[in-house]
Amino acid sequence: MGLIHIYCGDGKGKTTASVGLAVRAAGAGLKVHFVQLLKGNESSELNILRLIPEITISRCEKNYGFTFSMTSEDKQNITESHNLILKEAIKLAESNMLNMLIIDEFNTAYQHGLLDRELAKNLVLNKPEKLELILTGRNPDKIFIKAADYVSEISAVKHPYKNGITARRGIEY
């Protein structure tokens, strides 16, 4: 039986938690597909995931930046990219070739309308029975929280960004 996990909140560690789960699953011989939405920049965790044969990755290859700085054209382009990635992931999930599907930044992309919401909603509410589904990102929709079996909220108590320290390779990316 596959369950639904959500890692949400304003704290650091949502992607990191999902990466840890991917590694654990792969270590048990499970097939994992890791989808990364909204992020197209270099990411150290993906470098190591690519070395694990049980894990495949799909992501946006262009970095569009934060949602608040995207142009209308950027939003249109990233939405098209997300929809292609999401359709590919659904096809894999429905083929029973996967044990686990992780969609990083799913909640954020859904909230900002940067993917086909009906397609996304259908995936979550009608996922294959044996598929373990992991969704990350801030502010998950109530419908997803209700459908989830695990919801872990990561809150920011303190973050170095507020002191002017930018993302560091190997720590934040």
Image (cartoon, grey):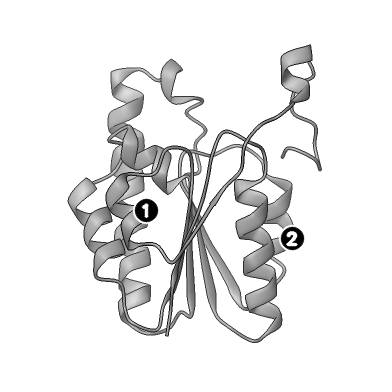
Count the labels in the image. Answer: 2
Judging by the rendered image, the residue that carries numbered circle 2 is 48
Q: Mark 2 or mark 1, which is nearer to you? A: 1
> Residue 109, percent across and down?
37, 39
Left or right for 86, reference 44: left
Residues 93 and 122: in front is 122
Label 2 sits on a secondary structure element that is: helix
Q: Is residue 108 above or below residue 65?
A: below
Question: Looking at the image, which residue is at 45% across and 79% down?
Answer: 98
- Location of the N terminus (image quadrant): bottom left
- Location of the C terminus (image quadrant): top right
Judging by the rendered image, the residue that carries numbered circle 1 is 145
Q: Earlier in the sequence, mark 2 or mark 1?
A: 2
- The residue sitting at the top extreme is 164
> Residue 128, percent across and down?
31, 78
- The residue sitting at the left extreme is 118
What's the amino acid at mark 2? Answer: Ile
Question: Looking at the image, which residue is at 74% across and 26% down?
Answer: 158
Q: Are marks 2 and 1 in contact (CB under 8 Å)?
A: no
